[in-house]
């Protein structure tokens, strides 16, 4: 084996021009694949952060309340009872935050706009407030009564700025409409494709006043974990515990809470029903982005590996023709056919491994250096949930790219290796 390794290494350095060209080809393929993996991972992380900041927790326990069958509100009438059931199930390092959610209209003068409204527990969510990008004002001011933060796009439609007064309109639990004059205290930057999903931000107290809710009512309890940790699959555990406590719990459904309102409104029931959803459920309408990037990464990977295989196949096929004397001489000296096959496979594997590892290392290093350094156009920033190119390389991804490219190089060597092994010792004499 050591002799084959020495011969293989020597042969890789004999034709340097061809070897360097092939090395660059394989390294480029590996670098592109690692770069696509870094982009896919970075977009997924940026999307997850935006969703957890504005839209959802890792797990959500929300409610739908109907005073009579013709009205519905995304509310839990007694959040304290629900919290008492699910809080003992919360993993270490995680906690429950209370939020509200729903649709609201906002007006200023003759201008009107309608969007999703989210309420925050301002005093207990400093990290959330710090992660929301602002165009002006301060989110801490939401702690004051009757205040609101609007997205820049909604503020432009209303032609309001920080310090102006607007009016919120929303439907109360019983179906009546209510209005509340509020001060605009902050303007928020767009959060990717979430768009208007959280264009109106208020405090829990302001939402209760607007919706005519009791102090013990809440929209949703959201499970969040420190350091971005994922708590694991707890949705079925939460559902079972809530059912055992006597609550009417909706079956699992991979839909956002807003998509469930219309079907539930058509059902002939009244009272309280609870719903347990995951982050993936609430962000299911965004799956197209990450799934599309993952599919594109697979496609790019297949093309890159195919290019490597074709390039190496051609190079080794030419090498077999040029090394007819060498192969015949080795066979005449007693080298077995399987050793000749092993020699060419080893050459392909070494070239693939060395070149792909180099390309992967360079690509990963560039991803680290360029992360957050390349600004993106507005539309692409929305798609990627980041104003700069979100690159996030991971060692397992780089190792996978090296393995796949090296395996492709090894497979491309099989046919040239078999042709080389088919040469007889007499071919060396005939080629003299």
Image (cartoon, grey):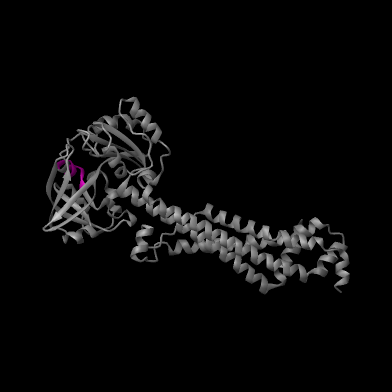
Above/below status of 202 relative to 213: below
Magenta span: helix, strand or loop, mainly? helix
Residue 212 or 14: which is nearer the viewer? 212
How far across and down, in percent of the image, does residue 165 sit?
12, 55
What residue do we see at 45% from left, 64% from top?
A: 369
Residue 299 picture location, percent across and down: 53, 58
**Residue 16 percent across, percent down from the top left:** 68, 73
| The quadrant where residue 378 appears | bottom left
Confirm whether the magenta stretch covers residue 8.
no
Place residue 332 in its image quadrant.
Answer: bottom right
Q: Measured along the vertical axis of the image, is residue 171 above or below residue 286?
A: above
Q: Quadrant of the C terminus?
A: bottom right
Residue at image position (67%, 60%) is 412
Instruction: Assess whether residue 208 is covered by the magenta stretch.
Output: yes
Quarter of the picture containing the N terminus is bottom right
Q: Magenta stretch: give its range.
A: 202-209
| Residue at 53%, 52% in the rendered image | 396
How many numbered discs sit on the rendered protein?
0
Q: Position of residue 37 (x, y in %)?
A: 49, 57
Query: Image height check: is 176 above or below 247?
Result: below
In the picture, residue 164 is in which quadrant? Answer: bottom left
Residue at 14 percent across and 54 percent down: it is: 107
């Amino acid at each position: 084996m050591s002799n084959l390794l020495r011969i293989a290494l020597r042969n890789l350095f004999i034709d340097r021009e061809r070897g360097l060209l092939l090395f660059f080809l394989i390294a480029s393929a590996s670098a592109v694949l690692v770069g696509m993996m870094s982009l896919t991972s970075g977009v997924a992380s940026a999307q997850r952060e935006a969703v957890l900041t504005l839209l959802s927790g890792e797990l959500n326990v929300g409610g739908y309340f109907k005073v009579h069958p013709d009205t519905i509100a995304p509310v839990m009438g007694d959040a304290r009872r629900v919290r008492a059931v699910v809080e003992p199930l919360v993993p270490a390092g995680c906690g429950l935050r209370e939020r509200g959610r729903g649709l609201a209209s906002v007006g200023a003068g003759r201008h009107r706009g309608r969007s999703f409204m989210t309420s925050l527990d301002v005093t207990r969510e400093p990290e959330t407030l710090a992660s929301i990008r602002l165009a002006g004002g301060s989110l801490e001011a939401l702690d004051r009564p009757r205040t609101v933060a609007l997205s820049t796009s909604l503020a432009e439609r209303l032609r309001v700025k920080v310090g102006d007064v607007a009016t919120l309109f929303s439907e109360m639990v019983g179906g009546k409409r209510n209005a509340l004059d509020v001060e605009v205290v902050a303007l928020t930057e767009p959060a990717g494709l979430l768009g208007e999903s959280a264009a109106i931000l208020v405090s829990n107290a302001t939402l209760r006043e607007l919706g005519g809710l009791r102090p013990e009512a809440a929209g949703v309890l959201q499970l969040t974990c420190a350091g971005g940790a994922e708590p694991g699959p707890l949705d079925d555990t939460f559902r079972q515990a809530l059912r055992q406590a006597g609550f009417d719990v909706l079956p699992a459904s991979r839909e956002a809470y807003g998509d469930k309102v219309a079907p539930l409104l058509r059902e002939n029931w009244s009272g309280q029903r609870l719903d347990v959803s995951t982050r993936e459920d609430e962000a299911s309408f965004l799956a197209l982005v990450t799934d599309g990037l993952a599919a594109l990464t697979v496609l790019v990977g297949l093309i890159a590996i195919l290019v490597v295989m074709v390039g190496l196949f051609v190079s080794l096929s030419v090498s077999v023709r040029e090394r007819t004397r060498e192969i015949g001489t080795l066979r005449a000296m007693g080298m077995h056919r399987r050793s000749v096959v092993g020699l060419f496979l080893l050459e392909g594997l070494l070239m693939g491994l060395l070149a792909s590892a180099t390309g992967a290392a360079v690509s990963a290093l560039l991803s680290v250096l360029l992360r957050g350094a390349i600004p993106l156009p507005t539309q692409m920033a929305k798609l990627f949930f980041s104003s700069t190119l979100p690159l996030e390389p991971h060692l397992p991804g780089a190792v996978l790219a090296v393995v796949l490219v090296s395996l492709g190089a090894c497979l491309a060597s099989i046919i040239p290796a078999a042709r080389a092994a088919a040469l007889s010792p007499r071919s060396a004499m005939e080629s003299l």
